[in-house]
Image (cartoon, grey):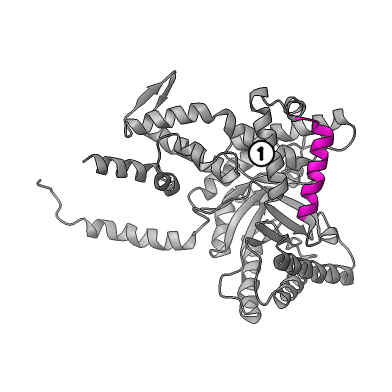
Amino acid sequence: MKTTIDDYSKFTAPLDRALVPFMKRFPGNAGERQPVHTVYGGAQLFKSDTTRKLGEKARSILDEQGVDPFTFARAIDIADVHAERIWQRVVEKLAREPVEDFRIDFEDGYGNRPDDEEDRDAERCAREVATGMREGTLPPFIGIRIKPFSSELMRRSLRTLDIFLTTLLGESNGKLPSGFVVTLPKIQLPEQVTLLVDIFDAIEPKLGLAANTLRLEFMIETTQSILSERGESNLPRFLDAARGRAVAAHFGTYDYTASCNITASEQRMDHPACDFARHMMQIAYAGTGIWLSDGATNVLPIGDRDTIHRAWKLHVDHIRHSLINAYYQGWDLHPAQLPTRYAAIYSFFLEGLAAATERLRNFMQKAGQATLVGDVFDDAATGQGLLNYFIRGINSGALTEEEALATGLTIDELRSRSFVKILQGRRGAVR
């Protein structure tokens, strides 16, 4: 077939040169498991078996206050038809892996203490992590949250990080636990991220770590992180400053709403100001592989049964709000929030399973042609969204691969994570 231009390379070369460094710069976490939550706990309380004890406490609270599958389901507004299935999955999760990600907190959950006390806690926590590594009691993801890099606290913050890493690697034969990350809170300037990365560069060779081993995550909880004084977003600049070391960005609900001068009674997860900030994070980090995490529900399930049930319902409502807005991770602050974290996620995906299965199965049978199933029209743009539903459901533990294969996908297609590749493969096979 005749073409007007014989060689496109001189046109495509500039874009090729631009794309290659972009992809190297933002490797992200593509294809990796993202935890569904991060549990924060003060460093003064951390022990090697902390997360196991949190699971035991969570199960005890579920049995005592949830009573049975149907009482629990009705307390958090889950349909009876899913009650037993969700209860069973929550119970199994609490026994097997109650916490997916834990952050040893030297910031808000720890407070400002005498230097010698924080030195001791940094060393002790590192030894506890090393013990957890040997005994297999750590969650799949773990890390520490240091103090913010303000003029008053940055030196204290760096000393804590140095003591923790030096002690940990000395106790663990130079190894870090899986999924280890350092959380930098209250970022206002890209230079704060640069400082942490510079410290990583300096400390890795001294500790015998390979270059770029240490990873960080942003806490997005100030108005300056969303927009600078010049009206420019600092979020992409944070990513530039991280020099390929950033893995996640966590939204800090209460610090952010406070920085917006929102009164305490209106500081809540679903405030419109929070929705704006979270959407800015989505736009800034789309396509980078950076994991996004929502904040925490600070009304804790403590007290009599009615009070606990109300707090559970609020927690579930907040998690659903996050999930609807494509935030698949959030913070938890108390063991009584673990049952509702998993119940909210499992119910969110299970309630949509039948419809999503039918839509995707019908879509795949047509190999990408537009189809009409019931009163919902699907075209190719919807395909990736349907695939994402199953990918996220499996990632969270709400769905199994077998349930996803009922759509007609093969296991290789499912794991490709790309609807475009699936269609290309099927159309190639047809030819």
Q: Provide residue 383's location: percent of width, then percent of height.
A: 41, 35
Query: Is residue 424 at all visible to an observer of this figure?
Result: yes
Q: Provide residue 308's location: percent of width, then percent of height.
A: 83, 33
Residue 306 in magenta?
no
Q: Which residues are magenta?
A: 51-68
Tell me which corner region of the image, top left, top right, bottom left or bottom right, holds residue 157: bottom right
Residue 65 in magenta?
yes
Query: Is residue 271 at all visible to an observer of this figure?
Result: no
Q: Is residue 44 above or below residue 56?
A: below
Q: Provide residue 252's location: percent of width, then percent of height.
A: 71, 47
What residue is shown with label 1?
Answer: 89
**In front of the other: 379 or 338:** 338
What predominant SS class does the magenta segment belong to? helix
Q: Is residue 391 left or right of residue 427?
A: right
Q: Is residue 95 above or below residue 137?
A: above
Q: Residue furthest top?
A: 375
